[in-house]
Amino acid sequence: MNIILPHLPPQWGRLRGGRLRVLDLGCGDGILARSILARFPNAQAVLIDFSAAMLDAARAKMGDDDRVQIVQADFTS
């Protein structure tokens, strides 16, 4: 994440009335979404993965963050 996040423009936090929306396909344990949400506190994220185990890990790490929606789906089909 240290490679990606410095390249995200700070203006993203001001898009759409200050509500950046992130779609994390193949989210795994949600590390990318967590990093983006930490940098942009007004952001919202939808995390999608086909693995129930990975989504359980993402839920555990995200806690009760109301900015996050977690969906189990296979986005390749």
Image (cartoon, rainbow, N blue to C red):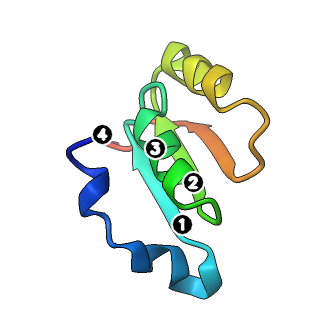
Query: Label 3 vs label 4: CA separation?
Result: 7 Å
The tag earlier along the polypeptide, 2 or 4, is: 4
Q: Amino acid at mark 1?
A: Arg
Which residue in the rendered view is the most extreme toward the top? 53
Horizontal side of 47 relative to 74 (left or right) equals right
Kindly identify which numbered label has been placed on residue 1: 4
Query: Label 2 vs label 3: CA separation?
Result: 11 Å
Whether label 2 touches label 1, CB < 8 Å: yes
Which residue in the rendered view is the most extreme toward the left? 3
* Residue at screen point 30% across, 39% down: 1
Categorize mark 1 by other alpha carbons within 10 Å: few (<14), some (14-19), many (20+).
some
Dot 4 falls on a residue whose secondary structure is loop
Whether label 3 touches label 4, CB < 8 Å: yes
According to the picture, the residue beneath numbered tag 3 turns out to be: 35
Dot 2 falls on a residue whose secondary structure is strand
Whether label 2 touches label 3, CB < 8 Å: no
Query: Label 1 vs label 4: CA separation?
Result: 18 Å
According to the picture, the residue beneath numbered tag 2 turns out to be: 45
Q: Amino acid at mark 2?
A: Ala
Residue 35 pos. (x, y %): 46, 44
Horizontal side of 56 relative to 36 (left or right) equals right
The tag earlier along the polypeptide, 2 or 3, is: 3
